[in-house]
Amino acid sequence: MLETINLSKSFKGKKVVQDINLYLDNGESVGLLGPNGAGKSTTISMISTLIKPTSGRITMNGVNAIAKPGEIRSVSGVVPQELALYQELSAYENLKFFGSIYKLRGKELDKAIQQALEFVGLENRKKDLVKTYSGGMKRRLNIAAALLHRPKILILDEPTVGIDPQSRNHILEAVRALNQQDGTTILYTSHYMEEVEQLCDRLYIMDHGKIIAAGTKDELLSILSTEDKIKVEVNKLDEAFVEQVKTMEGVRKLEVSELQLKIIAAKGSSLISKLVHLTEQHQIQLLNFHTETPSLEDVFLHLTGRTLRD
Amino acid sequence: MRSFIKKDLLIFLRDWKELLTVLLLPIVLVIVLNFAFAGLFDSDDEVSMDLQLAVVNQDDETDAMEQLKERLVSDAAFEEQEANAIVEAAEEIQPVNLLSDYLESDDVKEWVTIHHLEEKEAAEKVKAGDLDGMLIIPQGYAADSLYASFADEPPTTSLIYKMEEETTDSSALQQFIQGFIEELNYQFALQEITGGAEIAAALPEGGLEDMGTAHEFTMTQYFTIALGALFALFVVATVAMKTGVEIRDQVFNRILLANIHPMRFLIGKMVSTIYLVVLQIVFVLLVSHFLLGVFPDRTIAFWGGIFALIVLLALVLSGLAAIYTAILLRMNNVDAANGVFMLATLLFGTLGGGFVPIYMLPKWLQQIGEWTPNGLFLAILTEWVQFEKLSSIVQPSLYMVGFFFLFTIIGVALFPKRGKAQ
């Protein structure tokens, strides 16, 4: 349905997005995951035809969408990261304006507004000015404005940034319903791992302007199938102990925070008995000790050497 | 298009701070300045003058008729009988007395105080600045002017007006005297056409009418129009600033993604500017009128003309809004763009007489001022308020239309083609 081929963007000679290859099939829900500054929003802006790529191609059903942006614009709805709303207008007036620029008129427009308001749970506050809304309500209205013309593809750029858990859940449920009940194709960017895990069939992981991994959740987790993740809590820590853990055979990555060690080690490296032995040597008491199933967060850590929120 | 206009109007009208600024502030300023300047000129409305004129009469009219008869017979070869008839008619005229009566008339006395002095004393007082000017009636003036008139020859003697330096007051005096001379010539001309004797010489009328003013143009009218136009410029700057908010909040991007022609956005801005400017100036003029009686006893046609000129200004300013909008879309820094618009507004406002009465500015600045939309609007309305003649405002109104097209073309040319991806 939608595909990008070697999509790149430079600003003032600096490449911010480099050789992005991704595709969206009809009815899919695809996540674009990455930390702040990874290039997700630039990628989204190119896909939604707001900015032109420096190089590369975007096709929509085989048609060059860079030359014919209308191919994507006519079937997509974009929920930008910023609240693209008129604060001095009511929710109803905002939706009426945005609906009318999508050439909706009369009863059709009224019906679309009513449905969008119900969908995001704002029908009771439709006459209130947007500037009186909470952050979560504004985010919901931001989504409603992109749904009026019933787009086939919904592109959401970090739609849950800075809102309360209740509104966040509401948005996630709404997006899931759009995908599963209405068959809307979703492209969802976030730096919240759990949102993407919850919503998306497939994932692209971005960092420093590049896609560093892609696949289904299971496919991505299999990257870590040769590793164990061990979490250790101790009563005290000293540098010599940490240094020795780091150089132990089989340890691939070590993260230290206060009195906790997170270790990623090669499967079957018999690390547990070695760790017990080492703590005794340093007269450190082992308070807690468990192995964890790797998560996408761990995949990201494995691929980039840092966490998503860094 | 209607949805764009409605959206812009709603956003503007809900900004109560902006509304207070463009609707109430000019009215408050009109009231304050009206009283302030009324005090300055010691009058409620009009700018009053107290001109001091010395009259030096060196002519002796007792011999004038004899001299006239002699010259008619000897120089112009009139028959004795004809010459007697002319002298008889001329006795009714007596130019020096006419001038004296003219200067002493009630209308002129409101403006001019006459001092009958000898030439030397008058010259000293004019030089010292005690008097605004001196008028010398030279010896033989009456006989010569009558002879010139009846013999249809150019006069050899004329009134001499002297002033130390040209000021508004001394120039006004000169115009008074010129007005008299023209009226006198007119009377002579009439006398010739009708054969002479039946015509009684009438005194020329004094006052502002002789200077060509059909209606008074008061300070209150000046400030109402000037401030109305000045705050219309603020309306334009505000419309542009709202565009800045649309860009910053990415609403503009959302509009672009709706796959509509971006020019609709620009045209929407222009049309909403027209509505807002018309509403704003009509409000300021009407409220000022009802509070201060700015335009008393004027006809429906006069008000129609005022409305048409306001619409014309609104058109010009819609072009300016197009330029501002296009610049905003091109500049990355919205705040810097807003600063530029505010500077432009202040510049237009100053040059166009929005902050200080334009006639207080040097002549060259006044001329530049008429090349600003608000300055030209003020000049046209000044003309309309005084003369209410369509012919006198046609040409400057065409300049306004020219401004509209020029601004619109520049705005459209600058408008980035953001419908396509950048």
Image (cartoon, helix red, strand yellow):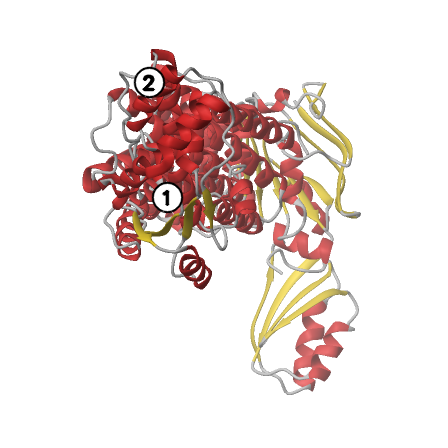
Give the percent coordinates (x, y) of residue A40: 64, 44
Q: Amino acid at mark 1?
A: Leu
Q: Residue at x 43, y 58 (%)?
A: B126
Q: CA distance from mark 1 to mark 2?
A: 62 Å
Q: Residue at x 45, y 21 (%)?
A: B73
Say which of B94 and A141 sits in front.
B94
N-term mark: 1 or 2 = 2
Q: Which residue is mark 2?
A: B85
Give the percent coordinates (x, y) of residue B328: 57, 41
The quarter of the displayed image where residue B225 is located = top left
**Image quarter in which the C terminus of chain A is found:** bottom right
Q: Amino acid at mark 2?
A: Ala
Examine the rendering and report whether any part of residue A155 can be seen.
Answer: no
The quarter of the displayed image where residue A32 is located = top right
Give the left or right position of residue A294, taking residue B43 as reference.
right
Q: Secondary structure at mark 1?
A: helix
Q: Which residue is mark 1?
A: B227
Q: Chain of mark 1?
A: B
Q: Residue at x 72, y 22 (%)?
A: A67
Residue lying at the far bottom in this picture: please name it: A283
Say which of B359 and A239 sits in front.
B359
Q: Pointer 2: residues within 10 angstroms few (<14), some, or many (20+)?
A: few
Q: Residue at x 26, y 16 (%)?
A: B198
The quarter of the displayed image where residue B408 is located = top right
Give the percent coordinates (x, y) of residue B79: 42, 15
Q: How many marks?
A: 2
Say which of B173 and B290 sits in front.
B173
Say which of A294 and B69 sits in front.
B69
Give the left or right position of residue A122, taking residue A181 as reference.
left
Q: Secondary structure at mark 2?
A: helix
Which dot marks residue A164?
none
